[in-house]
Image: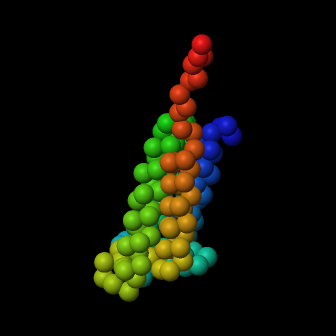
């Protein structure tokens, strides 16, 4: 696994997001499932829907980490989605459309995750063409 940056990143990010999703349920008891306000998990606001999303992303990354191609595709896809969520999150804070209870720290984390996942997904483990001997 360590020979593939995509598999390593998918495994680490998958485990972290899975644990964050589980830990989120410890602080979100009594909150509306998709409420605009969340409870703090360290500095990140989460609600039950946000926790479910973290569980799904963590599971997808862990399952994808079984192969280089799967990890690369999933890292790239989730990185693109996180880029979109990070940018949209800037406009959602304080609005009724903020069904994930995003706050500024969430946006920073989502943008940082996007950069890392996209960089590895698009830049690492590229198939190289075999060299041919020339006469």
Q: Residue furthest left?
A: 96
The residue at the point 57 percent across, 39 percent down is 125
The total of numbered circles placed on residues is 0
Q: Nearer the viewer, residue 107 or 35?
A: 107
Q: Is residue 68 left or right of residue 73?
A: right
Q: In the rendered image of this protein, does residue 69 appear above or below residue 57?
A: above
Give how far across and how far down residue 32 sits, in percent: 37, 76
| Residue 10 percent across, percent down from the top left | 56, 48
- The residue sitting at the right extreme is 2
Q: Is residue 72 visible?
A: yes
Q: Name the residue located 30 percent from the left edge and 82 percent from the top edge.
A: 96
Residue at position x 42%, y 51% in the image: 77
Q: On the image, which quarter does residue 30 sit in?
A: bottom left
Above or below for 7 versus 106 = above
Q: Position of residue 16 (x, y in %)?
A: 60, 58
The relative height of residue 110 versus residue 5 in the rendered view (above or below) is below
Question: Which of these two is toward me, 6 or 41?
Answer: 6
User: At which x and y percent is residue 93?
Assistant: 40, 82
Residue 61 seen in this snapshot: no
Quadrant of the drawing holding the C terminus: top right
Q: In the depicted view, which residue is nearer to us: 122 or 88?
A: 122
Residue furthest to the bottom: 94
**Image color mode:** rainbow
The residue lying furthest to the front in this view is 135
Q: Residue at x 61, y 76 (%)?
A: 42
Viewed as shown, does residue 120 lie left or right of 102? right
Quadrant assignment, res 80: bottom left
* Viewport quadrant of the N terminus: top right
- The residue nearer to you, when weighing 67 against 129, is 129
């Amino acid at each position: 696994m360590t020979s593939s940056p995509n598999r390593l990143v998918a495994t680490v990010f998958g485990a972290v997001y899975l644990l964050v999703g589980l830990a989120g349920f410890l602080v979100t008891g009594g909150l509306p499932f998709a409420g605009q306000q969340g409870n703090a998990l360290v500095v990140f606001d989460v609600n039950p829907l946000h926790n479910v999303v973290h569980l799904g992303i963590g599971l997808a990354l862990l399952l994808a980490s079984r192969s280089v191609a799967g990890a690369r595709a999933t890292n790239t896809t989730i990185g693109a989605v996180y880029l979109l969520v990070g940018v949209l999150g800037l406009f959602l804070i304080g609005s009724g459309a903020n069904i994930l209870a995003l706050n500024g720290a969430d946006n920073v984390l989502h943008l940082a995750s996007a950069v890392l996942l996209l960089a590895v997904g698009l830049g690492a483990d590229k198939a190289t063409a075999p060299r041919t001997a020339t006469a």
